[in-house]
Amino acid sequence: MTDTDDFHAHYIAALQTYLDARDEDSLAVGHELGRRALQERVSMLEIIEQHFRWVVEVDKQAPVDRAATLEFLLQTLAPLDVATRGFLDGTRRYAEQRARAEDLADRDKFRTALVNSLQEGFFVADHEGAVVDMNNAFAEILGYRADGLPYRWPHPWLVDKKTAAQQQARVRTLGSADYETPIRHKDGHLAWVTVSINAVSGTGTDKDVYVGTIRDITAERAFAARESAVLRLATAVGVAKTVAEVLSITLNECRTAVDARRVVGVMWPPGDGEPTVQVAGEPYESTWRGLDPWLRMTFEEARHQLPLTAKTVDRPDSPGKTQGLVATLSGTGDVALWLELRVPRWVSAEDRLLVTVLIGHLSLAMQHVRQFESARETAMTLQRAMLPPQEPPPGFTVRYEPAVPPLEIGGDWYDVLPVGDHCIGIVVGDCVGRGLPAAAIMGQLRSSARALLLTGAQPAVLLEQLDSAASLIPDAYCTTVFLAILDTESGVLQYSNAGHMPAVLAGAAPGSGFRTTVLTDARSVPLAVRRDLPRPQASQTLPPGSTLMLFTDGLVERKHESIDDGIARAADVLVDTMKLPLDAVADAVLRELAPAAGYDDDVAMVIYRHELVPLRIESDATADKLADIRHRLTGWLRAADVPDGLAADIVLVVNEACTNSVEHAYRGHPRGTMLLQAEVVEGEVHVRVGDSGSWKKPAVNPGNSGRGLVLMRALSDSLELDSTPVGTTIEINFRLPEAAGAVNR
């Protein structure tokens, strides 16, 4: 089947459909078929012949509404009729123009008149690219007149010479090129044109010449640039949080949009303070006093002009051409913008409109950000009032990282509070919800937890009591809390967890390297949630040099990821910080775990590094103090990772030394004191026991007593006794096994 046969088949089918439906849609199909016939060059006579042949054939079988079929035929022929009349009109006009041209005596004058009548710029270039002829429109678009011909390559109006050279090479190779490019008008303003060039073989020579047209598309580009700039500006300032950030975004956007050399934003503070300066472009100047005096005067005058209006400004030494535009962003005149043009020039209406639109959006953004800053300052003041003091106890570092969304306030909190001799209470909690309501709940729970910690109760008991407090606070239901009490001397951490993130402990591994432990014991439901069993409690001894981290879920929780993966990642990062100073650990953890877009939930974090400090116990030299001394010394030796057998010997020897002070130092005198000191130095445990009394001389025949010194010398590696009338001191040393010594050095 030929294309013509296919057309007729579609025509008959569409005609039958119209006869059945008799609606506008099926009639419109005839018009589309007419356009198709025009494209496929189907004969109008053949369409009419096929139409009536079909009508006659069908009418033999059943009567056909001939008026309807004629209506469909006319609908089909309408496009063909329009095309035919257009062709005839064009032929007639061509014949008229040709007859007129043939009647002209001077063909060159006719050609010149015809070329100059074109609205597009027309030019002719020789084989070297020099423009040798142009029409009036070309001169109007570029500002370069015909009396300056020829304009040799590179042309004086070119801005992007590299692209122009590439397109010229393309014309020489392919014979034609079409592209858009910026040009510099002779008066200095920037314009955009679309260029079409074709190569033409020269008459009587083997060298080509080039003819082309240019069309000014500056207005079209300006409209697109304005829409794009406004969209980019609205998107960028939507995430800005400070006035300085909004200004910085806008300055760079304006610089690109209006071909400015630099953009300067000035903001006056309340009162008589010196304004702040933001600059994009060169020359850069960040201080008010560093600006040109003429520019400072321009800014001062702008404070009194109508807001949201762009005023063109000429320099005194260059009148007649605009140096830049100045505008104020608010009715108070406290923010002004200066757009300094790359070269002094005439400013188009499109430039003014673009600047005005940008200034309007910027002014709205400034109002929004200022309101946000005021609200944020209020929120942050409240947050700081609710959080504990900035300086935690020695060995601790704390952080509160607010979420990225507005107001930067939430329900996460921490507290680190001394609750007794060498004991620190630690609380990290997270209330349900965000914003001021969650912060209000957090403040009440934090105050309750702090008061309960001071009672000295165990962590599990404290959580039981905090349950009661949470049940009385509206919306405190399901708050999670990790509560612990740390003995900084022994390194023993007692804790209980009410549905919170587990703590992570990183310390030295046997041999070399580090290992982590996730404290998952003693877990139970969040606060104010019904339960049948008491709160559990667990303990963990922190090895010397280990680091403990407690945190809220914002640090590790990520969408589409298991929370266990986040905790494991945090443990790995904590291990990587083991050699950093304590103050740098928290910052490194926050930095390494931060999502690309910033934390979308608050993060509260407490980090403690357990360093083994020398033991110092000063007490009354009485027998009832000996049990407490033994207990504290045992805990300290355990924290120092001293093997159990050696630790038992040390406790026995030290107990004997303290007993001697109790029994001998102050006999016959008022009760005195004794001092125990212990430290680990270079693989040895050094112990000193001293008092300010005088020991009696040993009896010649001591019987069953007097064997304490013998026992002490036998169990220790060295012992020195220094007894004087004003006091007695015993120096005792115990050598650690190699493994223990390596860990504690």
Image (spheres, rainbow, N blue to C red):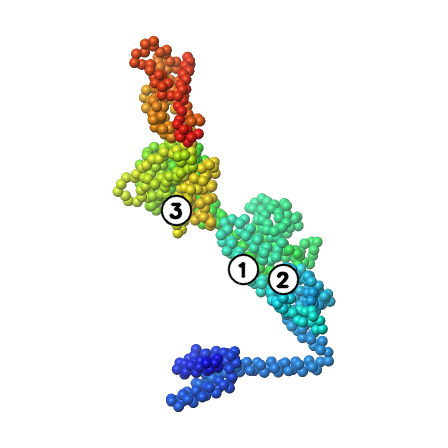
Q: In the rendered structure, which disc, 2 or 1, sits on the residue that comes first in sequence? A: 2
Q: Which residue appears at 66% of the width and 64% of the height?
A: 142
Q: Do the numbered discs 3 and 2 sit on residues whose CB atoms are within 8 Å?
A: no
Q: Amino acid at mark 1?
A: Ser
Examine the image and state in which quarter residue 124 appears: bottom right
Q: Which dot, 3 or 1, sits closer to the camera?
A: 3
Q: Amino acid at mark 3?
A: Asp
The residue identified by callout 3 is 565
Examine the rendering and report whether any part of residue 195 can be seen: no
Dot 1 surroundings within 10 Å: few (below 14), some, or many (20 or more)? few
Q: Position of residue 90 (x, y in %)?
A: 60, 80
The residue identified by callout 1 is 228
Q: In the rendered structure, which disc, 3 or 1, sits on the residue that comes first in sequence? A: 1
148 w.r.t. 539: above or below: below
451 w.r.t. 10: above or below: above
Q: Which dot, 2 or 1, sits closer to the camera?
A: 2
Q: Position of residue 702 (x, y in %)?
A: 32, 11
Marks 3/2: CA–CA distance: 54 Å
Q: Position of residue 483 (x, y in %)?
A: 36, 38
Q: Which residue appears at 33% of the width and 45% of the height?
A: 477
Examine the rendering and report whether any part of residue 717 can be seen: yes
